[in-house]
Image: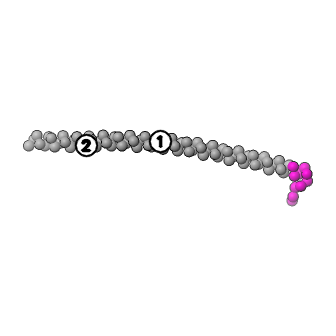
Amino acid sequence: MTDNIESLVLEHLRAIRATQADHGERFSRIESRLSNLEVTVAGMRRDLAHMYGEVVEQHASYDRLAARIDRIERRLELHEG
């Protein structure tokens, strides 16, 4: 009777170990996928920052052109208003 109980306990412990090993593998895969997502998000943030910088440069260029046009209109006395 004691041998049956011991073998039953050992069987349950083996099943628990197998389940834990499976969970360990799953967690490793999840960690890997999460790391990949973090790298992707960091890349997207970098790209967005670069695009924002380009927009700021375009606004600055537009402001310089508008100032030049205003100066030309004043010299030619074409300024309305």
Q: Quadrant of residue 10?
A: top left
Q: Nearer the viewer, residue 68 or 33?
A: 33
Quadrant position of the N terminus in the picture: top left
Q: Main secondary structure of the magenta part?
A: loop
| Residue 28 percent across, percent down from the top left | 38, 40
Question: Which circle marks residue 16 in the picture?
Answer: 2
Dots 1 and 2: beta carbons under 8 Å? no
Three-letter amino acid code of the residue under disc 1: Asn
Residue depicted at 88% across the width and 51% down the height = 74
Residue depicted at 10% across the width and 40% down the height = 3
Residue depicted at 20% across the width and 43% down the height = 12
Residue depicted at 52% across the width and 44% down the height = 41
Q: Relative to residue 28, is residue 70 depicted above or below?
A: below
Disc 1 crowd rating (10 Å Cα; few below 14, some 14-19, many 20+) is few
Q: Quadrant of residue 46?
A: top right
Disc 2 crowd rating (10 Å Cα; few below 14, some 14-19, many 20+) is few
Does residue 65 appear left or right of residue 48 in this picture? right
